Amino acid sequence: MSSSNSYPYPPRRPAHGGSTRAAQGVTDFLQKHDKLGMLLPALERLGTLEKACAKALPAIFETCSVLNLEAGQLVLAAPNAALASKLKQQLPKLQSFLQQQGWQVNAIRIKVQVGKIHEKSITSKQIALSNRALTAFAALEDSLEPSDRNASLKAALQAMLNRHSAQG
């Protein structure tokens, strides 16, 4: 990635109002070192470009990233072939949007990078059962015949009752 690209930024600069201390620390570190300091404009440019891509295709671009923009060719990373295929279908829309934003994008390539998987945070939902419901499940578990057919159902009911009695 070259910091002396001949392709201009869009006219507006990225907003730094919501930057965190960690991001500021990284910026300060890069600015203090000659060779690393040359990377800062390129990183800011790619970060701004990635935000523009996410604005154009929010649902698809959630797990993708910008790898490079050089000589008018934008290179994007997708975490799997299925998402790369969906992204490929949206390339004309993305290219048009970016050009309207002032980016000189003449072509877009997609690279599948399996190692770059961005996992969404999975929140676990805990269902709170009323005492009446727990009593009904306990009665059901007690009323089932002790047979091979009912063994897994009885075990599941007992596990659920144990889990809910531990929570309460």
Image (spheres, rainbow, N blue to C red):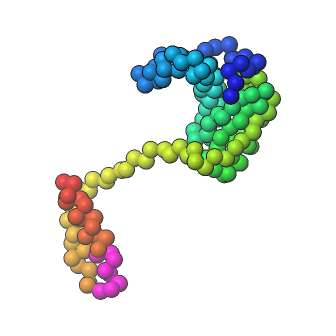
| Camera sees residue 129 | yes
Using the image as rendered, state which of residue 118 and residue 36 is in the foreground.
36
Residue beneath the point at 28% across and 70% down = 157
Residue 18, position as x, y percentages in the image? 46, 20
Relative to 122, is 48 on the left or the right? right
Residue beneath the point at 67% across and 47% down = 112
Using the image as rendered, state which of residue 137 and residue 96 is in the foreground.
96
Residue 151 painted magenta? yes
Q: Overall secondary structure of the magenta stretch?
A: helix
Using the image as rendered, state which of residue 58 and residue 43 is in the foreground.
43
**Magenta part of the chain:** 147-154
Residue 69, position as x, y percentages in the image? 71, 29
Residue 159, position as x, y percentages in the image? 27, 67
Dividing the picture into quadrants, the one containing residue 47 is top right
Residue 152 painted magenta? yes
Dividing the picture into quadrants, the one containing residue 160 is bottom left
Q: On screen, 127 above or below 159? A: above
Specify the quadrant that holds the N terminus: top right
